[in-house]
Amino acid sequence: MNETLFSQIQRLFERTYAQVGINLEDCLIDRQRSAQLSRLAGASARELSELARTFLRYADDRLYVGIYYSRWLIEQLERHDPRAGLSDRNIRSLIVFVEELNHALHAALNFKSGRRQIDSEDFARNLELQAQIDTYLVLLLFVAFFRKTQRVSRTDKRWLRFHLFARNDPDAFQSENLRGRYLETNELAASYTDYLDTLNGMRRLEEIRTFRSLDYSLKKMHILALPHVQKLALPDASR
């Protein structure tokens, strides 16, 4: 049986970090259920993308996960399958697809390790930061796969960074909290992935595994302590 894009990416993340213990495809929900959960999530949820969303709920010492992908997003990935090549036609759709899967996976891994304050802002920022970093690394793999030398050029990286970091516009959010969340995590992820680009494969793997185990405040401190980002200016520096 052919593997789905979803299962292939989940398996990649689990090989990199740890087994989540469930098939996350079983957590996929339809548009109607997504709309119900969005209403329950409150006003701020209305500002989040309708292309895809991840819903988390903690009850009875269990974590409940729902992952929603719009029909339009799935059609784009089916029409321009990134496994056949990455281009301007599918990179944005792939980014959204990978980030939501990543949110669910790391929420489950954090839950298993005892981090269960899923309603906290630090938890949300942790998931967002990790997703942007992991998605960048996935994009690198997709690009390298289609290069004869298996090497990603500086031009490739500039293109990936444009779509993943430069195109994001945190100011589009009316919520001050959401603006701060996406602005801060975007800056941190861009800086950290720039650092990861300086490492060889084995060193990079060791680094990201250690990094994933940190909570958000420690991840932020770690990135700001790196030599090339010591003077990085971030909003809401009191966090």
Image: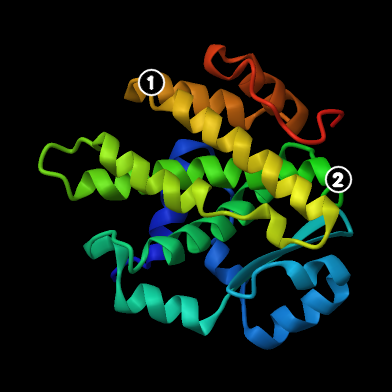
Query: Residue at position x 58%, y 20% from top?
Result: 229
Q: Is residue 102 left or right of residue 49?
A: left
Which residue: 28% across, 35% down? 154
Q: What x and y, as percent, mark residue 18?
A: 54, 39
Which quadrant would residue 69 be assigned to in this image? bottom right
Q: Is residue 7 left or right of residue 177?
A: left
Whether tag 2 and tag 1 are in contact, CB under 8 A, the answer is no
What residue did someone put label 1 on? 198
**Amino acid under disc 1:** Thr
Q: Is residue 221 above or below residue 41?
A: above
Identity of the residue drawn at 22% across and 47% down = 145
Q: Is residue 184 above or below residue 6?
A: above
Quarter that holds the C terminus: top right
Q: Residue at x 50, y 43 (%)?
A: 134
Reading the image, the residue beneath label 2 is 117
Q: Position of residue 138 (x, y in %)?
A: 40, 46
Q: Dot 1, crowdedness within 10 Å: few (<14), some or many (≥20)? A: few
Evaluate whether residue 235 shows in this view.
Answer: yes
